[in-house]
Image (tube, rainbow, N blue to C red):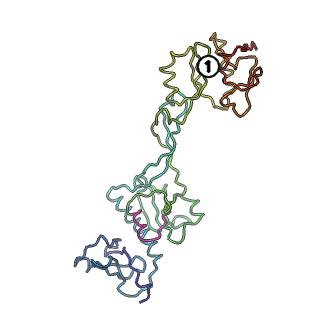
Amino acid sequence: MNKQYEIKYKYAKNCSKEIVFIEDLEDAKKVRSEKFTCISCENELLPRLGKIRQKHFAHRHRHECSKETYLHRLAKETFCQEYSYCLEHRIPFFIELSVEEYCERFLSRFGSRCDVGRNTRAFDLTKRYKEVVLESRDGDFIPDVLLLNHDHTKKLYVEIAVTHKATKKKKESQQIIEIKIRNESDIHVIKARYVKESSNIKFYNINPTPVLGRCLGTASCPNRAYVFRVYDNGKTLFFPETYPRAYEIEATDKERFVYCEVISYPYEDHYRICRDKLIEIRSKGFYIKSCYLCRYHAENRSKDRKENPIFCKFLKRGLDSNYATECEYFKLDIN
């Protein structure tokens, strides 16, 4: 027998035109008497339910049957069948997406929300898309499966790639889930009603709106606010702190300093802002002894400027600004 007719399929359509899986069928008289048809060539199939050989469907008669067509139709019709079942029975059909999250805990204090980062979240497609259509024309395209919201203003294409992927033009035009199907076992991702990006599943133009997340704590907060602190010995500290830590310093630790202020400035302005802020605070009568205010200071432009922002023209080297508290050569720049 030509091998082409020896194809053993795991799926077929029953008399109700529903796709059934051979492993779900029992060796019973009712099953053996039911008529099954091939998803690809639409000819009759016989269920082989023996306990010795692996269960499968076999063609009753010899027919030209394409495995590529079989897999393509199996995948798209299974998707429609599973999604329709979810809509009818109010069961979720999930898509897992990487979503930007933000936190607004310190928005009122610092004037900006925190970008928490990206996290994976599962969204129920049935909450948005209330209709599923098989191979229906949509403008210039005929998607394998088309999902629509209640007034057809939102669309999502589901494309099945067996040997041919969706065209570049189609990928650029719509939100698309492309599912690669190589064999029958790949159908499980559809039957699981949970799709996420993988080597077999790709998403195109699906960019979820950022969602409100939760503050992950002091150490992991991505946003920074500069906290300007002056100690009673004249030492100063101008350092970026996470929003939670800056809030804590301002609210509970303020009594430890003779002056404390939270400043939301970008790091690029660090040298100028620090110098100007020190001049401003000293003009208010606070005692400050900092290299920024020394007549011998200059901006350090060498590689170590992040750790040592000051270049001392007297000592000829880079320094931390608080070196002035112990420097015998410190002289206040009256200008």
- To which quarter of the image does residue 237 belong? top right
The span picked out in magenta is: 178-190
Q: Is mark 1 on a helix, strand or loop?
A: strand
**Residue 161: x %, y % from top left:** 50, 68
Q: Position of residue 244 (x, y in %)?
A: 49, 29
Seen from this angle, which residue lies furthest bottom?
1
**Rendering coords of residue 225 (x, y %):** 57, 29
Q: Which amino acid does the dot numbered 1 rest on?
A: Thr
Q: In this view, does 54 lie to the left or right of 248?
A: left
Residue 4, relative to residue 229: is it above or below?
A: below
Q: Which residue occupies 44% across, 73% down?
A: 71
**Residue linked to disc 1:** 236
Would residue 64 be found to the left or right of residue 141 on screen? left
Residue in the foreground of this view, choosing between 89 and 192:
192
Q: Which residue lies furthest to the left in this view?
A: 29
Could you tell me which quadrant the C terminus lies in? top right
Determine crowd level at label 1: few under 14, some 14-19, many 20+ residues with C-alpha closer than 10 A.
many
Q: Taking 29 as reference, is 143 left or right?
A: right
In the displayed structure, does residue 238 sit left or right of residue 95? Answer: right
Residue 90 found in image quarter: bottom left
Expressed as whole percent of the image width and height from the top left, the position of residue 150 reads: 43, 55
For the point 64% across and 14% down, the residue is 288
For the N terminus, which image quadrant? bottom left
**Is residue 53 part of the magenta span, yes or no?**
no
